Image (cartoon, rainbow, N blue to C red):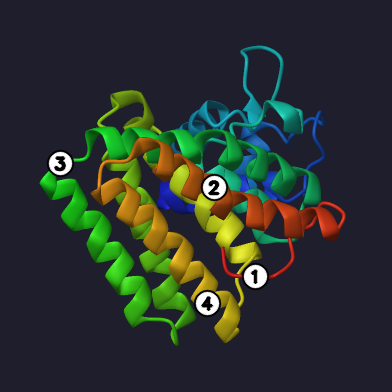
Amino acid sequence: MTKTNRLVEIFGKQIAQGDYAPGSALPSEAELCERFSVSRNVMREVIKVLATKRLIDAQPHRGLLVMPREQWNYLDADVLSWALEKEEDPELIRSLLDVRSLIEPTISRWAAERATAVDLVAIEAGFNAMKENCQDPHAFHEADIAFHKAILAATHNVVIQQLSDAISALQRTIFGKTFLTEAHHMELTIEEHRALFDAIWRKEPLLAEQASHKMVNRTENRARKEKGSPVHQAA
């Protein structure tokens, strides 16, 4: 990781995690250079990156301001992970669940319609890795992400594919908040993913969409019981 990238992460986390209040003025460029012991060129590049992520308003002659939270680019994987790393944000998680409910069933339907043999091999590999790693939460989690990422790739939609990292970050965040290793939860999770994989393999779009809806709704229903904060279950 370069010095610039490290500073983007450090400063970005500070902003996303509330060290600087939304709408507040940030220190001047010169002060930030001194604070982080970097050159103006490095600091300007950091500011440029964070402005692209819509964490900072860096318009000329206005100073640096923290953007309102509702304007942050939550489709940016860094912003999403930084915002949720320090503490749980029920409102943001609720929004993520809404987005997941909106897009995942459609992605699954498109995958069932469009998946090639190569796509099916990738989806199956993710599913098999989930089955093989039921006793290893980290490996299971990564296999789960790979399974859904392979389904997304199988849509062959260039716009959706450009959102792949953001959608995977969204899934990773939700799974991280809703994961539980108890046997009955794990069995249900495997069966739900098996139903989705089978529907895509058999090229049955409606069944794939329904299987995805069922998977998402289980998480959402449990989230409602916790007054907007997801309980820990397998995703």
Nearer to the camera, 182 or 174: 182
CA gap, disc 2 and disc 3: 25 Å
Q: Residues within 10 Å of mark 1 (few under 14, many from 20)?
A: many
Residue drawn where x is 34% and y is 33% of the image: 110
Nearer to the camera, 160 or 62: 160
Q: Nearer the viewer's eye, disc 2 or disc 3?
A: 3
Please, what is the three-letter code of the amino acid marked with disc 3? Thr
Nearer to the camera, 28 or 79: 79
**Mark 4 or mark 3: whose residue is earlier in sequence:** 3
Q: Are marks 1 and 2 in contact (CB under 8 Å)?
A: no
**Mark 1 or mark 2: whose residue is earlier in sequence:** 2
CA gap, disc 1 and disc 4: 9 Å
**For the view shown, which residue lies furthest in the top direction?**
61
Q: Secondary structure at mark 1?
A: loop
Residue drawn where x is 82% and y is 31% of the image: 24
Please, what is the three-letter code of the amino acid marked with disc 1? Gln
Instruction: Identify residue for label 3.
Output: 116
Q: Is residue 228 left or right of residue 196?
A: right
Instruction: Identify residue for label 2.
Output: 170
